[in-house]
Amino acid sequence: MAPIMQVVFDALSLGSLYALGALGIALIFGVMRLVNFAHGDVIAFCVFALLWPSVDAVAIIFAGNLPWFLLIPFTLAVGAGLSVLSEVVVFRRFRRANPATMMIASFALGFVIRYFLLMLFSSRPKSISLLPGLSQPVELLGARIPLLQLITILVTIAVLIGLTAFLRRTRFGLEMRAAAENFTMARMLGVRANRVIMGAFALSGALAAAIALILGSQTGTANIMMGASVMLMAFIATVIGGMGSLAGAVIAGFALGAIATVMQVILPPDARAFRDAFVYGAVILVLIFRPQGLLAARGTKERV
Amino acid sequence: MSLVSLSNVSVRYGRLTAVRGVTFTLAEGEILFITGPNGAGKSSLLRAIAGVTPPAGGRIDFADHDITGRAPEDIARLGLSMVPEGRDVFGSLTIEENLMVGTGMHARERSWKARAANELEAVYATFPILKERRHTQAGLLSGGQQQMLVIGRALMTNPRLVAIDEPSLGLAPNITDQVYERLITLRAERRLTLLIVEQSSTRAMMVGGRMMLMRGGEILLDGDARALGQSEAMQAAYFGYGEH
């Protein structure tokens, strides 16, 4: 029993990370058809924002020493701020460009952020201890899991509930859903394009910051490339979920987490190193049979 | 006092010119039909007025503001409600949510729903079927119901001008009758100004009002709908007789 629950918790916490990442990508794709490849670098930036610039192997914790009730809002604000800044400085200029151009612009922006961090911190991974109390294990349903894993799952559930309530109950949420489906029509009803898009970027950036906090505490290292692997899986989750479908992105994120965790367990030890190849194989199979994604987003109308 | 005035407006898509130097004014309370064959530039003209496709040249004024090149949301906020071709409902939103999208622009967040409630009841009174199915996803409605929904949604913003692109497109004639009947009543009740694009002049002749004929991106005829509809000039201009 215990090992099964262990696997379930592993799958849920890994899936949570992918789901949060996929949501951040799907939110922006929904309103402006931009696949934001800079998302992973926003994650890394949020972690490094907690450190003092230095090229040493041991990090000089700066904002990271704040108590949690200040640390969390600070990091979320950094993520949201950087994300909104990237929209105002970069993506706004590409509003009428085609999606491929915007995608390449997002690659470029990602490199700018990454090399900015490289300049200040060097490429060496740094050890950090973020929210140290969270690594102690807790007993739950016969499984021994780190407290952080539990919190990750709970935070993700809270984020999902909060986001759903926001999208369903508030005016801004309604405008965002309308804009995601048919941006031009929403504008013709007086919905302010810039506000909706900036809102989507702020939410997406805050989600990136949440991932940064979880990853930073989980791995205990700050690495310039740390956002990249989550970002790749999150991107795949948005594709499988049906680009732009938020529900699809979340479901696919959890599904990928589950597949990856289960494969880790059932694959013969020799094959475990190639786990990701099997995961991507499963992805290819899904896309062969459902090229539009699990939940195809409605309103893939052309926008002006 | 004119509500809308266009002077020498042209619209281009790349090297293709869809509208060539169109000039006209529309008075408050007037009803204007723009008719013409496929590809005449009717929809492009409407999209230019709504700000979706900024005009390549000329000037558009609405409600004493120069709206040339302004964003669609700014123009909507001045009181121009556009119902584009093909009934753009938000399919995954419910009917009520669809109606509510346009109401945000006049109210602050807290008073939003309360302020929209009156408008909502008025629209439901006009289109009872919408009230009956208020929590249904809009994508599941029939074509006629969707057309009523988009007209209702346009009214929710309390507009001065409603511009509708082909309200009869894809609808059975008796449903089109219903849609027009409601439009005419609404116009009388609210002193609405209506700008309606239709391919054929039949509707314009039934309803009456002013009619313009567009072809090749230009306005060829402008006059009383009934008189113009019966004239030979209309036939000739519509089909382009006597040009070769």
Image: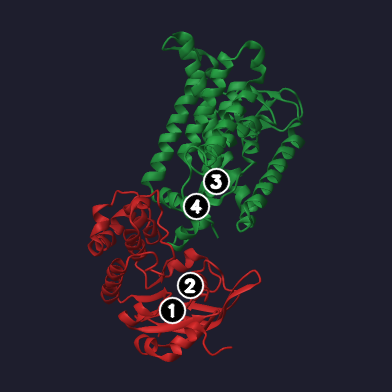
Quarter of the figure that contains the C terminus of chain B: bottom right
User: The N terminus of chain B lies in which quarter of the figure?
Assistant: bottom left
Numbered circle sitting on residue A28:
3
> Which amino acid, mark 3?
Ile
Q: Badge 2 is on which residue?
A: B46
Mark 4–mark 3 distance (CA, rounded to whole Å): 10 Å
Q: Whole-percent x and y of residue B97?
A: 35, 52
- Residue shown at the point (67%, 17%) measured from the top left: A273
Which is more toward the observer, B89 or A84? B89
Please state if B235 lies on the left or on the right of B147 as rendered.
right
How far apart marks 2 and 4 lie (CA) works out to 25 Å
Q: Residues within 10 Å of mark 1 (few under 14, many from 20)?
A: many
**Label disc, if present, on residue B34 of the rendered structure:** 1
Nearest to N terminus: mark 4 or mark 3: 3
The mark nearer the N terminus, 1 or 2, is 1
* Label 2 vs label 4, nearer the camera: 2
Q: Which chain is green?
A: A
CB atoms at circles 3 and 2 under 8 Å apart? no
Disc 4 residue type (three-letter): Val
In the rendered structure, the answer to whether residue A26 lies left or right of residue B188 reads right
Which residue in the protein does label 4 denote?
A: A196
* Subunit that carries the residue with mark 2: B
B46 left or right of A95 in image = left
Q: Nearer the viewer, mark 4 or mark 1?
A: 1
Colour seen for chain B: red
Circles 1 and 2: CB distance less than 8 Å? yes
Q: Is residue B13 visible?
A: yes
Q: Are marks 2 and 4 on the same chain?
A: no
